[in-house]
Amino acid sequence: MNGEANPDIRDITLAELEQFFLLHGEKKFRAKQAHDWLWRKSCQSFDEMTNLRKVARQLLKDHFSFNTAVAGIHQKSADGTVKIGFRLHDDQWVEGVMIPSEDRMTACISSQVGCALGCKFCATGRSGFKRNLSAGEIVDQVTGMLGSGSGISNIVFMGMGEPFLNYENVKTAIEKITSDDGLGMSSQRITVSSVGIPRMIKKMADDDPKYHFALSLHAATDAKRDQIIPFNLKHPIKELADSLKYYNQKTSKRITIEYILFGSFNDSATDAQDLANFCRNFPVKINIIEYNPVKESGFTKTSAEKTKAFVTFLEKRNIVVNIRKSRGKDIDAACGQLAGNQLKIKN
Ligand code: SF4
């Protein structure tokens, strides 16, 4: 068989791999050995699987390929944030960001090449949608970052793409990252951030996730949200709120709401009141995020005074609010800025 046309071995389940070996006259336990190399030891070639006998390795070579996302271009920000471009097997690029802080190293990773949702403030949305990442390519971003020598304490799916539009691969990747047969990281340290796909929020709730979920809300009325998140035109706030209620009832978890403050757009006392009204539906925690203007988006960052007034308004209504400063602005690595330069080079 032509190696290039072969499926990525990381897209094959352990059960399928067992069937494969049995079908080709090999012992079933070879599958577990190969699986260990793939997910626990993060190997990138069949030749690394040294405890598989040669004939078993050749079988794998003949039928599968490695479509690894390879860490390429690194850019380091003045604040220590590092952006990494990952080259994919089909010559596409995605970006991931390592964000150091006093007590943690957060890996911000991508779930898709580009994004179809076209949010007006987001550089990724402006680049259009290319394709979903495979579970292996998602995990590669984590192992690539681990390979840079820094540990990772937290993972956020806040890079390129809408994770809930690539739900199954994101779910499989999280399983591989958290399982003892994989990287063994705690699911409590993983957050999946979504613009809010109601049917997928309900599906996630049914799946009883151990990871955290964060909603990118950014405006609490349809009149405003429609202007920045086109997806909201078809799936308005009421539908979104219903799905969040369902999630809260099913999981008993509070909802983390991400809210970027845009200057003179969603930062007034009325906007704060609208947000407080939205939050009456379920227990919440709000992260207020500083915006990094994306060229030609037309949006600006709000002032420090307005941010303070907005936060105070919410806190007086007993809502838990955190302010998230943006990091990595000078290398276009901050929230909403991943596009990225590599993609521009390629297209
Ligand atoms: Fe896609 Fe998220 Fe950007 Fe919206 S904000 S376009 S969902 S990547």
Image (cartoon, rainbow, N blue to C red):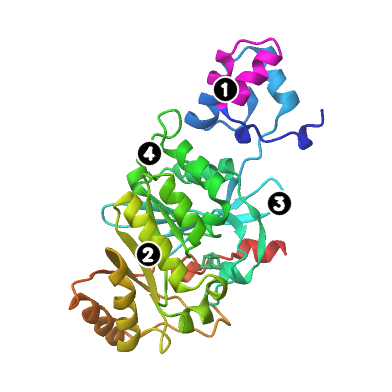
Q: Which of the two discs, 4 and 3, sits closer to the camera?
A: 4
Task: Indicate which disc, 4 or 3, sits on the residue closer to the N terminus.
Answer: 3
In the drawing, does residue 134 fall left or right of residue 268?
Answer: right
Residue occupying the point 29% across, 58% down? 254
Query: How far separated are the C-alphas under marks 1 and 2?
Result: 40 Å
78 on left or right of 297? left
Secondary structure at numbered mark 3: loop
Whole-number angstrom distance, CA of label 2 to CA of label 3: 30 Å
Lower position in the chain sequence, tag 4 or tag 2: 2
Inter-mark Cα distance, 4 to 3: 29 Å
Magenta residues span: 14-33
What residue did someone put label 2 on?
A: 79
Ligand 1 contact, mark 3 (Cβ < 8 Å): no
Q: Looking at the picture, does residue 223 appear above or below residue 160?
A: below
**Does 10 appear above or below 82?**
above
Give the residue furthest to the right. Answer: 1
Q: Which residue is mark 3?
A: 91
Q: Amino acid at mark 1?
A: Ala
Residue at image position (38%, 57%) is 246
Q: Which mark is residue 291?
A: none
Q: Mark 3 or mark 1, which is nearer the start of the sequence? A: 1
Q: How many marks?
A: 4
